[in-house]
Amino acid sequence: MTTDPWSVRRLHAVNDAQIDALAGVLIDCVEGGASVSFMHPLTRERAEAFWRRVAQGVAAGERALLIAEDAQGLCGTVQLVLDQPENQPHRADLSKMLVPRRARRQGLGAALMRAAEATARECGKTLLVLDTANDEAARLYERLGWTRVGAIPDYALLPQGGLCDTIVYYRKLGG
Ligand SMILES: CC(C)(COP(=O)(O)OP(=O)(O)OC[C@H]1O[C@@H](n2cnc3c(N)ncnc32)[C@H](O)[C@@H]1OP(=O)(O)O)[C@@H](O)C(=O)NCCC(=O)NCCS
């Protein structure tokens, strides 16, 4: 029996209400200073446009999109980029792991990662790769058994400006 206040599921199609909620989560993370491809301020229009492109990838089977929901609504998300070059069919990139500030530090990030790894296995993937500029996320990945490859200095801009490193990780999914 689970006592978690949230549930995690995979979306195979993304509706307008989910686009709206995902945009809210992304905006919250950027406002909080997360380096997740966007500069501050992230408008709702740009955030929704991003999720509409993701939704197209989901519909095409190129991406797996997971969401977490609690009593207040959508409270986290993570993606697997399944569509890879023909010589890397066993690999996926893990991307856009986002938990809004209101839902952090309760174990939801760990739950999303475990669900993403299970989904990757279901999709026949045996190797996952990600990179992160977030120290808290890096601790989470290492706790869950991901292997640190190394840091790339000055990889991206923080949302408010200023360069940050990114750390590359991989995880081999056994049997
Ligand atoms: C990184 C991120 C996804 C982590 O999500 P989260 O839900 O807070 O993750 P967890 O709750 O599993 O773990 C975070 C911390 O809470 C702690 N924690 C977990 N459950 C807890 C509980 N019940 N009580 C107290 N602390 C708890 C964990 O031990 C961990 O501690 P640490 O930072 O000291 O190592 C979230 O901070 C986030 O979305 N950040 C912005 C976006 C971003 O940078 N994403 C990563 C892109 S690669």
Image: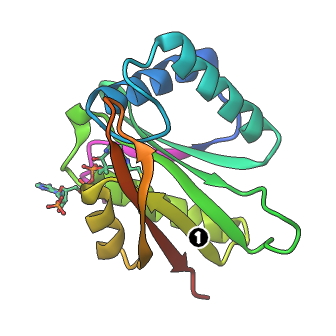
Residue 147, compared with residue 110, is above or below; it is below
Picture coordinates of residue 16, whole percent (x, y): 61, 15
Q: Residue most toward the left?
A: 105
Q: Quadrant of residue 110?
A: bottom left
Compared to 89, does 77 lie above or below?
A: above
Q: Position of residue 44 (x, y in %)?
A: 48, 12
The three-letter amino acid code for the residue at tag 1 is Leu
Q: Confirm if mark 1 falls within 8 A of ligand 1.
A: no
What's the magenta region? 1-9
Q: Quadrant of the C terminus?
A: bottom right
Q: Which residue is mark 1?
A: 128
At x 72% / y 40%, what residue is drawn? 58
For residue 2, say whether it is visible: no
Count of numbered labels shown in the rendering: 1
Q: Which secondary structure type mostly characterizes the magenta part of the structure?
A: loop
- Residue 92, position in %: x, y? 66, 64
Q: Secondary structure at mark 1?
A: strand
Residue 126: % across, % down = 65, 78
Up/down of 137 relative to 146, above or below? above
Q: Confirm whether the magenta stretch covers residue 100.
A: no
Q: Tell me the quarter of the picture where residue 142 sits.
A: bottom left
Q: Quadrant of residue 32?
A: top left
Q: Quadrant of the N terminus?
A: bottom left
Residue at the right extreme of this rendering: 86
Left or right: 123 as drawn, with respect to 97: right
Q: Is residue 144 above or below residue 79?
A: below
Q: Nearer the viewer, residue 38 or 9?
A: 38
Camera-nearest residue between 148 and 96: 148
Instruction: Kindly identify the residue that appears in the image at 65 percent across and 49 percent down.
Output: 64
Which residue is rendered at x = 26% and y = 42% of the image?
A: 5
2 falls in the magenta region: yes
Quick check: can you spot residue 139? Answer: yes
